[in-house]
Image (spheres, rainbow, N blue to C red):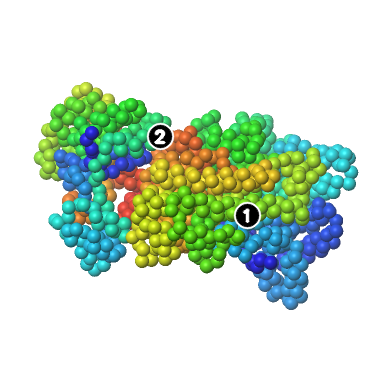
Amino acid sequence: MSSLPVFNIERFAIHDGPGIRTAVFLQGCGLSCRWCANPESQKIGPHLMFLSQKCIGCGQCAAVCPNGVPVIKEGKAQFDRARCVNCGTCVEGCLGDALKISGKAMEPEEIFDTVIRDKDYYDSSQGGVTLSGGEALLHINELIPFIHLCREHQIPIATETCGYVSESIMKTALDYIDLFLFDLKSMNPERFRENTGGDLSVVLRSFQLVAEHYPERIIVRIPVIPEFNHSMEDIKAILSFACSQGVKRADLLPYHTLGMTKYRQLGIPYPYPVETGLKEDDLLPYLKIGEELGMTLRIGG
Amino acid sequence: MVKFDIEGAQNVEVSKRIPCEKSLVEQLEIMERYTETHKRFSKESISRREVECLKVLYPALFRSVEDSDLTAGRMDFLPIGFGCVTSVGGVGHYCVFGKLRAFQRDIAELGQEYYDRTEALYQYWVDHDLKTQYCREVLTETTIGRFIDVEYPLIATARLSGMMLDYPKLLDHGIGGLRTIITERLSKDEGNEFLMASLDCLDLFTTCADAVREKVLKQKEALGETNPKRAAQLTRMANDLLTIRKGKPEHFTEALQLFWLYALLAGVINYGRLDDFLGPYLAKDLDSGVLSEQDAYDLLKSLWQMIENRRTTVNGRIIVGGKGRKHPEEADRFLHIAMKVCKDCRFVEPQFTLRIDETTSEETWAEAMDALGVGATYPTIYNDEVNVPAVSFGMRVDEETAARYVPFGCTEFVLWGQSTGTPNICINLLKILNIYMNRGVDPMDGQYKLGPLKAKDLSSITSFDEFLEGYQEVLNYYMDLAGEAQYRSYEIMNEHVSFLFTSILMDDCIERGKALLDGGVRYLGGTCETYGNINASDSLWAIKHLVFDEHKYTLPQLEEAILADFNGYEHIRKDCLACDKYGNDLSTADDMANMLYEFVAKGIRDRGIRLGMQYFLIVISNNSLNTEWGLRTSASADGRHTGVYMNPANNPQGGADKNGPTAMLNSLAKFDAKYHGGSVQNIKFAKGMFNQNKPLIEGMFKTYFRKGGCHIMVTVVDKGALEDAMIHPENYPDLIVRVAGYSAVFVNLDKTVQKELLSRHLYGGEA
């Protein structure tokens, strides 16, 4: 059986679909959104994450690293990322709990062993599992054994998707996914490419494919990002498109900057220029668009 | 004879006391009269002496009626007097020496004569204070300490905590009716000192009702014509007192007054199932228009205020809901009003307690969630579907009797009107483990604390089973001490006092013509508080994993690191911390915790039965002793440093649970409730998180209960608490916040994210 590149399993996820859920986060994504809150999800494989404030400068990492990556300067470790192979040896040595490796290959059964433990909570809350990422659907074929296990135990499957996958993947997904939390970020192809590196038409094709068969299985999710789509015009365009495809539910997610710590931990600069999150109240004016279109529109999700 | 500090603090006093209303000289005179009476009746029966002493205290110690009181009866207590528990005065004929010394310092300012008179009292009570007599006999140099001496692995005391009286009997018969019952019983057993003294107690009740009525009338007189509304209230209160001085209550306010005055005189500080007891009176008055909903609310709010003002710290239980109520419909009317009062008052006491079962209405659940959502911390919720069968097994009674269970104090169960359940022993499982691992010597003070047992040499141990057997042998020794010390506390109390007011309302004291601890109480039960349970089991798991499974270290190597508090052995500590920990829904650490739990719980229970008690059960309770005892408990194999708090209640060690609330609840639900007599499960949420997700969280609690969860104590905190949690993470090990799309334990998040959450909260965000 094929393993899956997991970077987190979050139990009691209550904002990733209905009810109490377990969110399984998989690595790999065709897009690279500048505001991405999970930078460790973008590339498959182990990533060394270093939290400087926890570093006690003990030098254990430098002592054990086979490649001489860490050096201690002014009481803190510094990492020459170019030479780091993410082997994790330094994590074993770290006394300050400042280092960890994110990203681990897991077998479907292993993931399922965790997921099944909250089965009673899913049942009582109409919850289930949410496949998230990254773009979880990139691994749809490898996910099938896991999904079968869930289905045997009547655990519904949702996915958070950006839709940036091939047509064949999306067709396969139709057979396995009970709910699509579908990210629509913009209807403007140029701006979409500039900020995510992707081709908007692929996303729209995926959306249409699902909507054509199961419009009721889609909840649109719009991350509202300042200086990108934080305008009446943008939000209206997205919602109008969704509505035209027969989709009636959408969530607005205010931009947040909680991912900034992760960029620091990975030793990469935060790529988006806005460093202040939005409040839920900032999104209230958009609710009337939902009313106009006859959609169920919520803030948060 | 063992030395101990008789002036040391006797219990944890969290709340500040309201000062005595009497002058220092008046207080001294009462204490002198009390002492003189105690001497004078020393040759008489203990029941006679007790009631004569009570007559000195009451009604003298009643305070004035406060402007807000809608039921009358407030009381002071002095450094010398009579009581059941340390929270209000002391135990039996007591002297609280530390407080008497403080009193002496104050009164000395009035002249040397007062100092000397106080000193004479002090010297008399050194030989007569009940608890001191117990301590002299039971405490040892190194194994059994006094409450609360955290140098010892086991502490013991004499007290009668948690009595919940048969108030329906009181309300159904009134004082006059009780008098008739006792008189009839006495006619078959002439000269029974206990019964005769009980009759005197009832007369004393009447005297007190009259005295309190005088205080009510005095307040009314002082009022003049200024406040007709208050004057009417006072008139009603005076009339109620006139009714219940001997008669049966007809109305709610009368029933409330009778219950309250009796509870004060009995010195009990937990009140029981007031919904079922008082509900019928309330419903009748609401239906007939004697009371409006608002009147009922005001009356309960005043009761809440008076209970709060007693400041009994971790007591004041009012219990509503659940199985076994005689008048469920009427009781629920009381319950709904009480829920509103609980939500509005947000006092530390009463500890408002909701028993739930499968039939608990959505309305009740919603009220409970609302009260919790505003940060009331109550109701604290007990699951009857689990607890009733568990109590039936644990206390060896049928399920109908088990449905009488009520939690008191920190969580201990007792059967109202039928059993004693006082926790007179506390035992520190982690300290015992550390002593065992260090060849019997407590690393904190270098004392050998295994009594007659021979210490084991760690280097000779070749398997985990052998290691565990050695620990269990030491636990067995301490459990023997626990059982004997608990049983002896009853014997010694029974040699000195009858607890008359309590005995009158406990089955089967009157019927048998015997005082509570003299063979009167139907079920002589007791409880033993255990501490450091999870630190000990996590330590056992770490030892098994690192030493015997992985062979990473030898036992002596591990012990060397622990004795050094991991200084210079940080890598070993890292490995200890990295071992699986209880509270993460992992069978490894959870099974170890359950094994230790069952070993100790069954061990204590079996010893109680062997000693002739109806039950002796462990309780895993919630107070600050885990922190205080942690200060004097050395570093442990779970990676905990010397002096650090131990795990609270039945929860994981702070910061050890990393898999979210469902995982923690799954771990909590694994213990079989039938072996314990109460176990507290805490969960904390940030306010926004809780209030925005109430239906899901309620659903989670219900699922947890269906999975076998016996209890949950929910704390919902605001931004100030989050800030405090950054400074004192040890106080918030289980505070759950929402982070972006997921939830996390706040203190496990890194500081940057914590700050971010706080800033979000500032502008009304999600934290």
Q: Are marks 2 and 1 on the same chain?
A: no
Furthest residue in direction top, as rendered: A213
B157 relative to A6, above or below: below
Residue at 23% x, 33% y is A1
Chain to which mark 1 belongs: B
Residue A39 locus on image (x, y percent): 21, 47
* Neighbour tally class for label 2: few under 14, some 14-19, many 20 plus, Cα within 10 Å: many
Residue type at numbered disc 2: Tyr
Looking at the picture, how far across and down is residue B58, in whole percent?
77, 55
Between residue B244 and residue B362, name the one nearer to us: B362
Q: Is residue B330 visible?
A: no
Quadrant of the image containing the C terminus of chain A: top left
- Residue type, numbered disc 1: Leu
Q: Which mark is residue A121?
A: 2
Query: Horizontal and vertical percent for residue B536?
Result: 48, 53
Placement of B102 over or under A243, stated as above or below: below
What secondary structure is marked by label 1?
helix
Q: Chain of mark 2?
A: A
Query: Looking at this view, is B436 or B456 the one in front?
Result: B456
Q: Quadrant of residue B300?
A: top right
Label 1: few (<14), some (14–19) or many (≥20) C-alpha neighbours in 10 Å: some
Please say if the residues under marks 2 and 1 sit with CB atoms less than 8 Å apart: no
Marker disc for residue B481: 1
Residue at left offset 29%, top offset 39%: A24
Asked whether residue B367 appears in the rendered view, the answer is yes
The disc label shown at residue B451, or none:
none
Residue B445 relative to residue B276: left or right: left
Under tag 2, what secondary structure?
A: helix
In the picture, measured across the screen, residue B478 lies left or right of residue B728, that is right
Q: Residue at x 65, y 61 (%)?
A: B139
Please state which of residues A252 and B475 is positioned toward the viewer in this rendering.
Answer: B475
Q: Residue at x 54, y 46 (%)?
A: B599
